[in-house]
Image: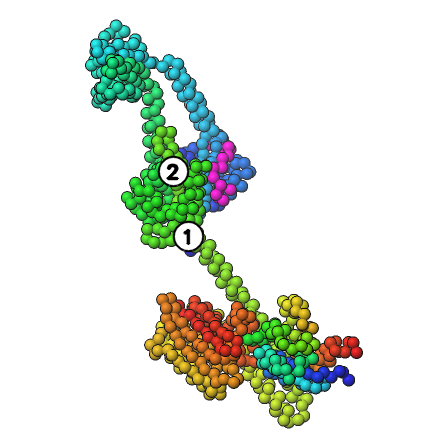
């Protein structure tokens, strides 16, 4: 039985994608709580509220209108939350471009880039890689 | 426009008449035409070598000719080659071949001018020159100078035997002042002599004149007559002077003059017909002494307007730094070169010109500058056009990259989602959950259809950009858009405030204007703030060049600092959720671009957005 996280945040402008990912997370049974947003602005609004916990794992779609993953991360780093750096941040994309990879490599907050869509296996692998390695 | 065959447009009839051996080659070094002298020199009496390559006409030319011809074509001047050419069956002769670039009126190199000089002729000239030098020296040695004296008081004339030799009279002859003066040819020579003597006696002025005398045997002789008055007690007592026979020298001078006149004539022909603007100006005053037709063409002023006036009156070198650069160059090298100057012609047209000048001076005369003027505007326009085309092409490539990127990203996303959702549905036993999955699937499918519709629209715009713009009443389009968006407006309880007058017209393509209005309006409503009723204010204004349509909303806004330049890019803006502000914006921008307009965005994150669309009035 893999480790169960307190909370996961999903950020993708496509409602179906969020829905599908939620389903896989449920199958993997790896989180007690999953929140999902279709825009970075909404996600930030949620994270600004001190009562809402900083998720242990955040999945962000790279290409989103209005606010891309990069801009979301900039805003995220300006959040006045002490525990914000504890979150594992994974970027998601349908196709991996070297440009995005390079960009991500230069941003310390990002733990990795994974291909969309997630699957039960991918989620388990992610949990194992980022959360169970020291256990 | 690029001229296909600039050479065919040139009138080459003058070439025949040119009194030297000149041939014109096109850019492939084929003979276009040549002067009569040139043809006869090589015994091409029926001129059937026209059109042939020079290297085929003279197969014996050395190997480096082609390179040198190419240099000339590149603009290198005065390339000299000593090489042999067949002058008639089996007979060769050496020539000095001069290669020069041949330029059209725009300064473009359109071929090569080949002129030849016989090596022997050059040698002949050398010998002639030596001969002349020798003659001059001899003349000096045996200079026929005689002295004379006139005693004013006694009115006595004394002439040395040399003078009497020049006058061709006996050594024992006695002349009075009058009879002596009468040897001077009637007219200006005698008048000058009389005046000179008068002035010498009355005001003490010496003279030095070249005058004609008629000798006793009737021959005309040019003499250099010099006289100096000598004063005693405040009065002119006598005049002493010399007479020198300068006939031979004068004959040479006269010949020179004649030649100068003749070559001047040739030069004037060339000057007048030159496809390059040319002017001769006086160095000290800057006044135009001579201008040719092309010079008038480029400046826009007529011959009569230009002649006698300084170049400063015609805005030439109106920039002080250009002028000082010219003067500096002239003082150092006697030449100047100024390129890509801005010049406003008489009719107000802006031109780019190149000026090349060189001081020409005859020893005694005032310094003059001969200047060539080339209008390079056409060349510049051409390169600007080219640059624009390259930029447009790059833009199109950018758009295509955007396009394919978007296709791969979004359709892939939609497709995998649908597959996954179908998988879930397949496995799902719970009816409620299945229904939920189906409705999500339906939404996803709608989004994908929307995306494909957008793509189709973009493709059809790309294929359809040759339509004509017309004046359109904007309000018609706004009402139509409001109708199309009725569902959205009702759902969101949006308020649309239209401040545009019913007579306000915009010049646009009807299909595009409709799309633009619909896209902007629906975006303004869709991107509303959840806690605020969406309010959209539409207004319009007109300035000299553009009609400006403004659409202002109180929605969520856009962070322009971060998104500004990416706002209208397809990949960036197209969302998977089908709300597709991106697609709409991309389309709007694309259509506005096609109508040569522009879009400005003003926005504050969380407070609202204003799109301003500029439609050119023309």
Determine which residue is flagged by label 1: B378
Residue B264 marker: none
Residue at the spot 50% in from the left edge and 82% down from the top edge: B528
Q: Which residues are magenta?
A: B71-88
Residue that extends furthest to the left in the rendered view of this protein:
B178
Residue at (28, 12) in percent of width and height: B148
Residue that label 2 marks? B369
Q: Nearer the viewer, residue A28 or B595?
A: A28
In the visual, does A67 lie left or right of B287? right
The answer for how far apart the CA atoms under marks 1 and 2 are is 26 Å
Mark 1 and 2 residues: CB-CB less than 8 Å, in contact?
A: no
Question: How many neighbours does mark 1 have within 10 angstroms: few (below 14), some (14-19), or many (20 or more)?
Answer: some
The answer to whether any part of residue A18 appears in the image is no
Give above or below for B527 relative to B12. below
Say which label, 1 or 2, has the lower sequence index.
2
Task: Classify the position of the C terminus of chain B by image quarter.
Answer: bottom left
Q: Quadrant of residue B536?
A: bottom left
């Amino acid at each position: 039985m893999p480790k169960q996280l307190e909370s996961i945040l999903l950020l993708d402008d496509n409602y179906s994608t969020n829905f599908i990912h939620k389903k896989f997370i449920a199958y993997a049974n790896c989180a007690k709580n999953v929140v999902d947003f279709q825009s970075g602005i909404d996600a930030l609004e949620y994270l600004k509220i001190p009562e809402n916990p900083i998720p242990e794992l955040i999945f962000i779609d790279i290409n989103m209108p209005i606010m891309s993953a990069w801009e979301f991360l900039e805003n995220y780093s300006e959040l006045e939350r002490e525990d914000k750096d504890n979150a594992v941040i994974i970027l998601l994309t349908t196709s991996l471009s070297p440009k995005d990879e390079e960009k991500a490599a230069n941003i310390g907050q990002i733990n990795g880039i994974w291909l969309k869509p997630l699957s039960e296996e991918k989620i388990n692998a992610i949990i194992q890689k980022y959360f169970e390695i020291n256990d | 426009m690029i001229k296909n065959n600039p050479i065919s447009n040139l009138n080459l009839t003058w070439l025949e008449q040119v009194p030297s051996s000149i041939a014109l080659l096109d850019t492939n070094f084929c003979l276009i035409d040549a002067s009569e002298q040139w043809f006869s020199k090589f015994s091409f009496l029926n001129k059937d070598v026209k059109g042939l390559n020079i290297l085929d006409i003279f197969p014996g030319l050395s190997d480096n000719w082609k390179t040198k011809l190419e240099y000339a074509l590149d603009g290198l001047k005065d390339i000299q080659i000593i090489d042999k050419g067949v002058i008639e069956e089996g007979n060769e002769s050496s020539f000095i071949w001069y290669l020069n670039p041949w330029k059209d009126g725009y300064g473009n190199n359109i071929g090569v001018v080949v002129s030849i000089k016989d090596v022997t002729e050059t040698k002949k000239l050398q010998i002639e020159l030596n001969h002349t030098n020798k003659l001059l020296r001899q003349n000096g040695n045996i200079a026929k100078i005689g002295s004379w004296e006139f005693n004013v008081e006694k009115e006595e004339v004394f002439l040395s035997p040399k003078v009497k030799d020049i006058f061709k009279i006996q050594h024992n002859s006695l002349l009075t002042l009058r009879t002596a003066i009468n040897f001077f040819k009637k007219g200006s020579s005698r008048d000058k002599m009389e005046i000179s003597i008068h002035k010498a006696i009355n005001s003490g002025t010496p003279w030095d004149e070249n005058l004609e005398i008629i000798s006793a045997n009737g021959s005309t002789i040019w003499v250099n007559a010099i006289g100096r008055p000598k004063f005693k007690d405040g009065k002119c007592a006598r005049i002493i002077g010399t007479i020198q026979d300068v006939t031979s020298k004068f004959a040479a001078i006269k010949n020179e003059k004649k030649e100068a006149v003749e070559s001047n004539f040739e030069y004037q022909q060339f000057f007048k017909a030159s496809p390059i603007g040319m002017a001769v100006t006086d160095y000290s005053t800057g006044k135009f002494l001579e201008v040719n037709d092309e010079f008038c063409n480029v400046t826009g002023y007529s011959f009569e307007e230009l002649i006698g006036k300084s170049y400063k009156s015609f805005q030439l070198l109106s920039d002080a730094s250009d002028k000082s650069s010219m003067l500096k160059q002239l003082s150092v090298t006697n030449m100047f070169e100024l390129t890509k100057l801005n010049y406003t012609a008489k009719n107000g047209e802006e031109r780019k010109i190149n000026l090349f000048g060189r001081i020409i001076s005859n020893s005694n005369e005032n310094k003059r500058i001969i200047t060539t003027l080339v209008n390079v505007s056409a060349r510049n326009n051409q390169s600007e056009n080219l640059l624009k085309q390259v930029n447009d092409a790059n833009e199109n490539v950018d758009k295509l990259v955007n396009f394919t990127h978007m296709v791969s990203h979004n359709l892939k996303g939609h497709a995998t989602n649908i597959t996954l959702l179908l998988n879930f549905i397949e496995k799902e036993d719970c009816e409620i959950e299945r229904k939920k999955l189906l409705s999500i699937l339906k939404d996803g499918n709608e989004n994908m259809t929307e995306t494909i519709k957008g793509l189709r629209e973009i493709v059809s715009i790309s294929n359809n950009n040759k339509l004509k713009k017309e004046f359109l009443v904007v309000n018609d389009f706004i009402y139509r858009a409001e109708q199309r968006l009725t569902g959205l407006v009702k759902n969101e309880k949006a308020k649309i405030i239209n401040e545009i007058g019913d007579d306000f017209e915009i010049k646009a393509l009807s299909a595009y204007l409709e799309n633009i209005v619909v896209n902007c309006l629906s975006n303004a409503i869709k991107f509303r703030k959840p806690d605020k009723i969406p309010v959209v204010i539409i207004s319009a204004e007109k300035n000299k060049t553009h009609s400006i349509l403004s659409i202002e909303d109180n929605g969520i806004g856009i962070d322009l600092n971060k998104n500004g330049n990416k706002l209208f890019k397809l990949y960036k803006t197209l969302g998977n959720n089908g709300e597709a502000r991106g697609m709409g914006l991309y389309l709007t921008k694309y259509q506005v671009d096609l109508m040569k307009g522009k879009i400005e965005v003003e926005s504050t994150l969380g407070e609202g957005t204003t799109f301003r669309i500029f439609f050119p009035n023309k």
